Amino acid sequence: MKHTVVTIQNAKENKEKVTMLTAYDYSMAKLMDEAGIEMILVGDSLGMVMLGYEDTLSVTMEDMIHHTRAVSRGAKQAFVVADMPFMSYQASVYDAVCNAGRLVKEGRAEAVKLEGGREFAGHIRAITEASIPVVAHLGLTPQSLHAFGGFKVQGKSEEAARKLLEDAKIIEEAGAVAVVLECVPAKLAELVSKKLRIPTIGIGAGAGCDGQVLVYQDMLAMFGGFKPKFVKCFADVGACMKEAFQAYMDEVKAGTFPAEEHTFKIDDDIIGKLY
Ligand code: KIV
């Protein structure tokens, strides 16, 4: 079954949880698609996990289009959402619509995601009016890293929690089809999920959300170093890959790979004539 804005909305109405994972290339998207993951996010987290930047701020429209196009080719059933990178929408509504259009037209995304609340309601409305579904992103919005003064849980004070709840209602009114809630206290995320008609997709926002998203390198322990509290390792693929790389290295050095079954044959008479 092909997942769309309609099936995702139906899932919320039927109280079925929605699953989303990030992917940045064809083969990973294909694996997730075959596993039945409903939504694939080509996150601008690709700047960190694929390109090795310290944050997401340097990611370009060209980076996003390149990776989204690869993911879209691998995702036959999953609904593909592409992140709008930093400064591809903040400066004007015109930029927002043009760049959202490029992600759909050139990247073959089926929806775009942008970070922020009421200040981007006009942008969300205009992109939606251009027939491009928008997923919003509230709470910890990594493109605002410097404005927040670091990666911190958001919405903890009464004022901040009230603002987040209001922002969620405003972006829903503006036409967002879903909202990612990142690093928000679980009880606040649950309340937002109850108050909204559209699905909430949580990351570090507890089980009360309508769906969950994780960065795949985090859930497969492929991205060493810092592990956020909300990440669960579902398989230690990082360790497994390192073991395989070492086994390959050992066999090449020992001359046991490639073996007979990995080689192509030629008639000995032909070889003899070449000596
Ligand atoms: O860029 C990304 O991967 C994201 C998720 C963390 C939601 O925005």
Image (cartoon, rainbow, N blue to C red):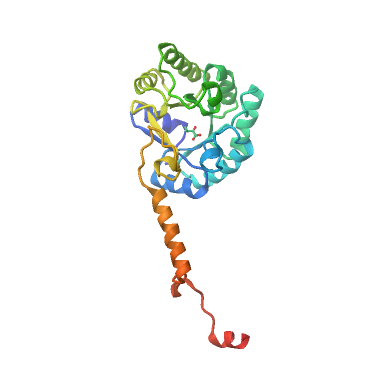
Is the residue 270 above or below the residue 100 in the image? Answer: below
Quarter where residue 90 is shown: top right
Instruction: For the N terminus, give its image quadrant.
Output: top left
Residue nearer the viewer, 41 or 47: 47
Numbered disc total: 0
Is the residue 179 above or below the residue 220 in the image? Answer: above
Quarter where residue 105 is shown: top right
Q: In the image, what residue occupies the spot 34% across and 25% down?
A: 208
Is the residue 101 above or below the residue 69 in the image? Answer: above
Residue pushed farthest top?
159
Instruction: For the C terminus, give its image quadrant.
Output: bottom right
**Percent position of residue 263, x then y:** 49, 73
**Percent position of residue 233, x then y:** 36, 41
**Percent position of residue 143, x then y:** 55, 28
Q: In the image, what residue occupies the spot 45% across and 70% down?
A: 254
Q: Is residue 136 left or right of residue 243?
A: right
**Percent position of residue 168, x then y:** 46, 19
Q: In the image, what residue occupies the spot 39% across and 46% down?
A: 35
